[in-house]
Each structure stands twice: as C-alpha cells, then as structure tokens.
Amino acid sequence: MLIPFLWLIAVSFMKDTQIFSYPPSFIPDPFIIDNYKKIFTKLPLFRFFINSLFVALATTIFQVIFSAMAGYAFARSKFKYKDAIFFIFLVTMMIPPQVNIIPLFFLMRELHWIDTYQALIIPGIFGGLGVFLMRQWFKSLSAEIEEAAKIDGCGVLRIFFTIALPMSVPAIVTLALFTFITTWNSFMWPLIVTNSNAITTLPVAIAQFKGTFRETIMWGDLTACSVVCAMPVIAVYLLGKKYFITDILAGGIKE
C-alpha cells in the first residue's frame, strides 16, 4: 500500500528525465523542488486548494451537526413512524450516488446554483451513513445519566448538548473524518456543477491539468499537484486517528 505513495512523493522531486529511467529509483538524483515552484507560480493552485478546503470543512461541519441531531432523535425520541423513516435513511445508503446525479443537477439548475458554493456544499451535508452512525452510537450509551438529568429539570436540547455530545466525541470525529475525506476527494459532482476556476476544487483541477494547462503531460508537475492534494487528508487523519481507533474498538466491546 505504501509503495505507490512513496513513489509519488519521490517522483515529485525528480526531473522528467529521471522519472522513466530504468531501473527505477526511489531517490531523486538530483533532488529538486522546481516542480512545486512551477505549480504554485504558473497555476492558481492556491485558489483551488482554498476552494477544496472551504467546501470540505463546511460540508463536514454541517454534516456532523445534522447527523448528530437526527441520530439522537432516532435513538432517544419516540414518534410515529420512527422505524419506517429510519429504514428509508438506510435505503438511501444502498443507492449508488451516480443514480442521483442527474435529478440533483436539474434541481441545482432550477435553484440557479450551478457554479456556486451552494451546489458543492448543500447536497453533501445530508447523508444516511452519518445518521446511522450517530444513531447507533447514541443507542450504545447508557440512558441513566440522561434520565437523571431529566429528573433535575434538564430539557432535551440541554441534555443533547451538555451530556450526549461530549460522550460522543469518538463517533463525531469518525464521522468528520469520513465526511472530510470523501468531500475532499470528490471529483464527479464538482466537475458537473462548476464551470469557472473561481470555485473549482483541487481534484478537478488536477484532472484538467493535462488538457487545460499543458500540451503534453509534465509528470513531475502532475505528481507535485497530487502530493499537495493528498497532504490535507493525511494530516486530518493523523489528527483524528486516536478517536477513530477508539470508535472502532468501542464497537467490539460488550458489557
């Protein structure tokens, strides 16, 4: 698994003449940083990076908020047709995302959201996986503390924000990791709904690198772009690794 990634990093510091040398080498000779200088000076790469970061962060924040609230409602509240509605959420997880692209595109067009941040963010802030994950986590928590809070006069919102959420940090971080990585790496949807460089995301920019910016593929420049695109995902995972592992382990522990 690591060899392709290590090769990607090595190639990003190589001259084009060394990239296809045989036998291949993982050590750049000479070691150059010109590939990174070129992509930041000749391309609006910083703009693409900021677009991807803004879209991924906004989608992640709203996804976590809405999924946590919906998951808590399904886990603790009692209302009519609760199981049927939750079943519908589960069904949406089984539908390939490609099926929804055409009707979703028409909806964005009718709302005049094509080539806007709304089209990149709003469709991604609702998802069955997040609701399912948070609902299962809340159901695994003991309800005794919440019942004691009710006796002391706490309302539902106060219990949710002061008791349930603080006890759900591993699940929240896990959902945030999944959402951020998925949104950051998203290609098809941003490609469809964006037309200008003003809001183009990094994966789309890299895919258009050959046809838009170069007559021939400059592999050193292209791999440098790929490394820049991969770094935030790795950084986010390393920051949340502790909570992610805690959530995975918690799923296998039985009282």
Image (cartoon, rainbow, N blue to C red):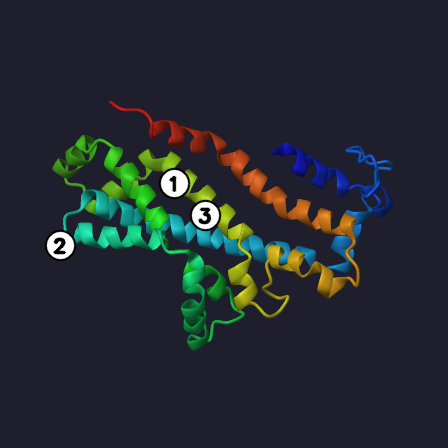
Measured as percent of width and height from the top left, residue 192 is found at: 54, 66
Measured as percent of width and height from the top left, residue 90 is found at: 30, 50
Visible in this render: residue 57?
yes
Q: Nearer the viewer, mark 1 or mark 3?
A: 3
Q: Which residue is mark 3?
A: 179
Badge number at residue 80:
2
Q: Compare marks 2 and 3 and give the one earlier in the sequence.
A: 2
Estimate how packed mark 1 is, as few (under 14), some (14 to 19) or many (20 or more) residues with alpha carbons within 10 Å.
many
Residue drawn 59% across the image and 70% down it? 195
Q: Secondary structure at mark 2?
A: loop
Mark 3: amino acid: Thr
Q: Is residue 211 above or below residue 185?
A: below
Q: Compare marks 1 and 3 and give the one earlier in the sequence.
A: 1
Q: Nearer the viewer, mark 1 or mark 2?
A: 2
Badge number at residue 172:
1
Quarter-wise, where is residue 50 in the image?
bottom right
Between 184 and 172, the one nearer to me in the picture: 184
Q: Is residue 239 above or below residue 224?
A: above
Badge number at residue 209:
none
Visible in this render: residue 122?
no
Quarter-wise, where is residue 22 in the image?
top right
Mark 2–mark 3 Cα distance, whole angstroms, equals 30 Å
Mark 1–mark 3 Cα distance, whole angstroms, equals 10 Å
Mark 2: amino acid: Lys
Q: Describe residue 84's horizontal placement relative to residue 95 as left or right.
A: left
Measured as percent of width and height from the top left, residue 106 is found at: 43, 73
Q: Compare marks 1 and 2 and give the one earlier in the sequence.
A: 2
